[in-house]
Image (tube, rainbow, N blue to C red):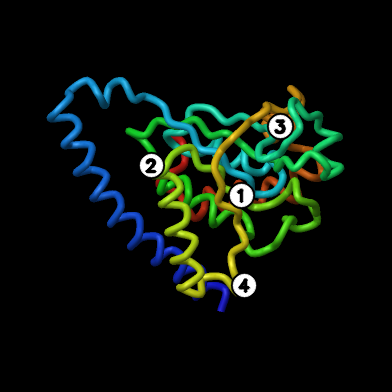
Amino acid sequence: MKTIKTNLLLSCFSLLFFSCSEAQQKKEATQLINNPTSMENKTMDTATFGAGCFWCVEAVYQNMEGVEKVVSGYSGGFVKNPAYKEVCMGTTGHAEVCQVHYNPQKVTFDELLEVFWQTHDPTTLNRQGNDIGTQYRSAIFYHNDEQKQKAEKYKAELDKSGAFDRPIVTEVTAYTNFYPAEDYHQNYYNQNGSEPYCQFVVKPKVEKFKKVFKDKVKK
């Protein structure tokens, strides 16, 4: 049953991605004709995702083709410049997130979303596995209307398709702030891959990404 639902999830995304991709290509072609330098100037875009512990999210997107930089940090709260210990107490309103800086000519927001949905459980409220608390909530902090529309559309379509056993609880909300996490949180898996949490929690997600998205893994 799990395999059937996984295939359904992939099929759903394929239909959504190709339809959006074709429209996006037409839009970019028109922009290029009307303004030949417009596409050259747009070299980087930003997406902000919360999907549990930011060590996992960072490690996954670091391996994705077209992603230039991933920064772990905190978003969605009301406390300025929060410390990790404060966020862990659940009193700052922030979620652990990663800002993904990507080249839109190599990878699209649609593809980033596809990886987002499949590398964590978007149906568990304020938790991922044994990590429990509002700081571990599933969230997409959109930076513009296009990101908002795509995130809401995909969320609704996936719910409708029955790809998951339970309703998706992912928060889709406007980006308002981002505070980089402490230095020791950055590039965490690559520097601490032998630690138990990395071996038992982070590594399986990275391996799943590489298996499911073979064509999107950095060479």
Under mark 4, the amino acid is: Arg
Residue 188 has which mark? 3
Label 1 and label 3: CA atoms lie apart by 21 Å
Contact between labelled residues 4 and 2, with CB atoms less than 8 Å apart: no
Q: Under tag 2, what secondary structure?
A: loop
Q: Under tag 4, what secondary structure?
A: loop
From the image, tell me which residue sits under label 1: 139
Label 4 and label 1: CA atoms lie apart by 17 Å
Contact between labelled residues 3 and 2, with CB atoms less than 8 Å apart: no
Disc 2: CA contacts within 10 A as few (<14), some (14-19) or many (>=20):
some
Under mark 2, the amino acid is: Thr
Pointer 4 or 3: first along the chain: 4
Q: Residue at x 25, y 24 (%)?
A: 38
Under mark 3, the amino acid is: Tyr
Give residue 101's position: percent from left, percent from top: 49, 30
**Residue 157 sits above or below residue 110 on the image:** below
Give residue 202's position: percent from left, percent from top: 69, 46
Task: Find the residue positioned furthest to the bottom.
Answer: 1
Q: Under tag 3, what secondary structure?
A: helix
Q: Nearer the viewer, mark 1 or mark 3?
A: 1
**Residue 15 sits above or below residue 199 on the image:** below
Label 4 and label 3: CA atoms lie apart by 31 Å
In this view of the protein, which residue sits in the foreground, 61 or 89?
Answer: 89
From the image, tell me which residue sits under label 2: 108
Pointer 2 or 4: first along the chain: 2
Residue 166 has which mark? 4
Disc 4: CA contacts within 10 A as few (<14), some (14-19) or many (>=20):
few
Label 2 and label 4: CA atoms lie apart by 27 Å
Q: Nearer the viewer, mark 1 or mark 2?
A: 1
Q: Residue at x 54, y 57 (%)?
A: 118
Pointer 1 or 2: first along the chain: 2
